[in-house]
Image: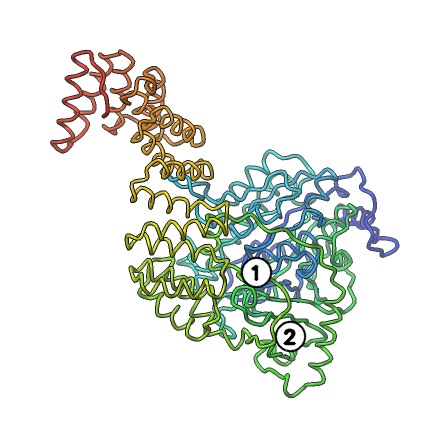
């Protein structure tokens, strides 16, 4: 360590209260850069420790994470609390274990507003804060955005219909957004970047796909390249030396171990042991064998920054500067099997080289002799198992629940979560029945379910249905399984079977609004519109904020000839989905058909205000302003302004756009401009004879100094 590094280390150690007395309480913030370090947190979704080069994996192509480990502390034995994204990140930012912060799975609960959050603490202390996440599972609806000035969970924004975009975004897009923020922010800052790329399905971009025989390794290599971009940006600005960098996975991936393809169900090392690398000013490079937990990171970050805060966990700061922590018991859990399927929850501890798993079928592994956790010793070591069970129970008694709030999840977010492969929770936590099967006994059912959902999402219902039928037969108490089976059967056109499966799902869980919704779709497709409306209304009773049942109800009302009621239902849809262009167009046409022209125009204007970048929508509005039969609805001047701007943005290659522009000019009395535009349209296309005849007829009107009226 050179003189500069020694001085920087001394300043940091003094700020941490570790130089003289070895304590763990943070000292007051000073005025030097070293006492107000920048903080970069990189969370690596679904990344196994044993797939990084710095953890000994020879085929790895992870030079940037390896380089970070070479100049920092690599924790050999670091653990996630849950093999799922949301609860682990809740633990990271609060220092609390899941029984304390109350988030046990994805897509159900939100972090309570009164739970201390490290980002909020740093923000109040003067840090600029930004977060950039890569999957809907970390949507701001789940409460982690608190304390971040910028919480970018936009993925790819919205699609052309105004629906939320894909449920995830690639690491390069997330990095682009993060670096744009970093370029404009002052110091000190806290930047959190979440990378989702190693999550299934594994599909790395080139050249990482070709360079890695295993696509999972390719995703990790691609992610590492994005980490390299961030570190390079900090280095180029002279910020890296004064930045605490924390790189940690939220969980691993089973990759077929223990009969699990991905993660979430089991609590073995494959998904619970995670890479953890910490580097920064004064940190002494080493490999630390002390046990570390994701729960330790909030306290570590705050202590390193010299900021007091009431987070949980034990600070790892002593380890970063050459010290050790005493041996301790590490806690973990998975309630996914219980909450999604009604199977036994799993609670686990790692203690003195042993892993014990509490469930309806307890497990015990000697991790020193059996690092793969293959040989279950619970029958051979009943006394040890009983002792560890008592130790686990005592540990859980120390956790004081802080409470959560229900997350506000609409159908879009629920669908995005489902598309990521997560079954939605259907069971309310409470006292456990005594006859629950263990997830280990049900792993075949889970694999069939997961594969079936995957095939269904890709419209491969011929492959999905047999798998879901087998899962339902093996576990008939699984409401989610019957629901997914019913949805796939309906989409395959097998409505009678779909009705049976969906009814079974409701019999097991009457709160499943999606079962009611799909029963409505089944009835509507069979012409039973009144029955369909009843199911859609029941779905709305279960989720009053929903909009898909309203869409279904509106369509059924149209089929019954009740257009005014259908328009009222669509108006509610548009109020809930103001950026959804197709719904706005549907409502506008409904109003037009009812003779409510000014309301039709108002809907289009509101949609354009919500989607100012949608030039096709603008041209549709211009057409209505120019050609609507109602005198009260038309506005030629506005039509020209809107059409000219849209054509300028899109170019003049689309003859339909030019036709709209011509109609706008005609309504504004600019007939020479209208003739020029319609002639340009006629020259620009090889239109079919019918379309050409329509345009030619409009040209005759313009030549006669008459505007066109549509209808």
The answer to whether any part of residue 532 appears in the image is yes
Residue drawn at point x = 41 percent, y = 48 percent:
549
Secondary element at tag 2: strand
Q: CA distance from mark 1 to mark 2?
A: 18 Å
Count of numbered tags: 2
Name which of mark 1 and mark 2 comes first in the sequence.
Answer: 1
Q: Quadrant of residue 649?
A: top left
Q: Nearer the viewer, mark 1 or mark 2?
A: 2
Residue 1 in sight: no
| Residue found at the far bottom of this picture | 380
Badge 1 local density, few (<14 within 10 Å), some, or many (20+)? many
**Residue nearer the viewer, 528 or 600:** 528
Horizontal side of 676 relative to 107 (left or right) equals left
**Relative height, residue 614 to residue 67 (above, below):** above
Q: Is residue 375 left or right of residue 215?
A: right
Residue receiving disc 2: 358
* Contact between labelled residues 2 and 1, with CB atoms less than 8 Å apart: no
The colour mode here is rainbow
- Please tell me the numbered disc located at residue 607: none
The residue closer to the viewer here, 702 or 314, is: 702
Left or right: residue 406 compared with residue 652:
right
The residue wearing badge 1 is 84
SS class of the residue under badge 1?
loop
Q: Report the quarter where the C terminus lies.
A: top left
């Amino acid at each position: 360590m050179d003189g500069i590094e020694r001085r920087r280390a001394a300043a940091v150690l003094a700020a941490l209260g570790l130089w003289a007395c070895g304590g763990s309480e943070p000292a007051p913030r000073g005025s030097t850069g070293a006492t107000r370090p920048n903080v970069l947190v990189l969370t690596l979704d679904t990344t196994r420790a044993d797939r990084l080069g710095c953890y000994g994996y020879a085929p790895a192509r992870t030079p940037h994470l390896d380089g970070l480990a070479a100049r920092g502390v690599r924790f050999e034995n670091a653990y996630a609390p849950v093999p799922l994204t949301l609860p682990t990140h809740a633990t990271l930012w609060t220092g609390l274990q899941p029984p304390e912060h109350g988030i046990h799975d994805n897509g159900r609960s939100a972090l309570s507003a009164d739970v201390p959050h490290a980002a909020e603490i740093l923000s109040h202390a003067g840090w600029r804060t930004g977060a950039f996440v890569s999957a809907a599972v970390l949507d701001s609806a789940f409460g982690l955005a608190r304390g971040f000035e910028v919480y970018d969970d936009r993925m790819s924004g919205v699609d052309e219909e105004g629906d939320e975009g894909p449920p995830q975004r690639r690491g390069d897009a997330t990095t682009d957004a993060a670096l744009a923020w970093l370029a404009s922010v002052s110091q000190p800052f806290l930047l959190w970047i979440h990378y989702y790329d190693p999550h299934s399905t594994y599909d790395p971009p080139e050249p990482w796909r070709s360079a890695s025989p295993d696509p999972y390794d390719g995703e990790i290599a691609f992610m590492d390249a994005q980490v390299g971009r961030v570190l390079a940006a900090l280095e180029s600005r002279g910020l890296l030396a004064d930045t605490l960098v924390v790189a940690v996975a939220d969980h691993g991936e089973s990759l077929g171990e223990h009969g699990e393809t991905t993660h979430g169900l089991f609590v073995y090392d494959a998904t619970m042991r995670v890479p953890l690398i910490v580097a920064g000013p004064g940190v002494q490079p080493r490999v630390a064998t002390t046990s570390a937990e994701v729960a330790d990171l909030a306290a570590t970050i705050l202590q390193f920054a010299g900021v007091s805060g009431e987070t949980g966990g034990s600070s790892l700061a002593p380890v970063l500067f050459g010290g050790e922590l005493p041996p301790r018991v590490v806690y973990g859990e998975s309630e996914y099997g219980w909450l999604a399927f009604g199977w036994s929850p799993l609670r686990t501890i790692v203690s003195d080289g042993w892993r014990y798993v509490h469930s309806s079928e307890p497990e015990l592994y000697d991790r020193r002799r059996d690092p793969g956790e293959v040989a279950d010793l619970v029958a051979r070591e009943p006394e040890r198992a009983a002792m560890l069970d008592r130790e686990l129970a005592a540990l859980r008694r120390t956790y004081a629940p802080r409470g959560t709030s229900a997350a506000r999840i609409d159908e879009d977010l629920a669908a995005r979560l489902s598309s990521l492969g997560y079954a939605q929770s259907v069971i309310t936590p409470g006292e456990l029945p005594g006859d629950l099967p263990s997830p280990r006994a049900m792993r075949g059912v889970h694999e069939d379910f997961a594969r079936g959902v995957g095939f269904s999402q890709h419209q491969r219902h011929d492959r999905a249905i047999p798998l879901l039928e087998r899962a339902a037969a093996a576990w008939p108490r699984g409401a989610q399984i019957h629901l997914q089976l019913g949805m796939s059967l309906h989409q395959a056109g097998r409505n009678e079977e779909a009705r049976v499966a969906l009814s079974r799902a409701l019999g097991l869980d009457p709160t499943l609004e999606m079962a009611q919704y799909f029963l409505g779709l089944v009835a509507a497709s069979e012409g039973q519109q009144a029955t369909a409306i009843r199911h859609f209304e029941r779905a709305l009773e279960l989720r009053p904020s929903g909009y898909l049942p309203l869409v279904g109800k509106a369509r059924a009302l149209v089929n019954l000839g009740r257009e005014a009621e259908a328009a009222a239902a669509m108006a509610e849809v548009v109020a809930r989905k103001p950026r959804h262009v197709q719904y706005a167009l549907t409502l506008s046409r409904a109003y037009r058909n009812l003779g409510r022209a000014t309301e039709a125009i108002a809907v289009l204007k509101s949609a354009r205000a919500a989607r100012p970048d949608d030039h096709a929508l603008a041209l549709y509005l211009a057409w209505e302003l120019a050609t609507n039969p109602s005198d009260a609805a038309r506005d030629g001047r506005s039509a020209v302004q809107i059409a000219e701007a849209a054509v300028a943005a899109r170019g003049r290659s689309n003859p339909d756009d030019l036709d709209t522009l011509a109609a706008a000019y005609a309504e504004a009395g600019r007939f020479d401009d209208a003739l020029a535009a319609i002639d340009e349209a006629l020259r620009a296309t090889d239109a079919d004879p019918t379309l050409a005849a329509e345009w030619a007829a409009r040209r005759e009107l313009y030549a006669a100094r008459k505007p066109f009226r549509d209808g």
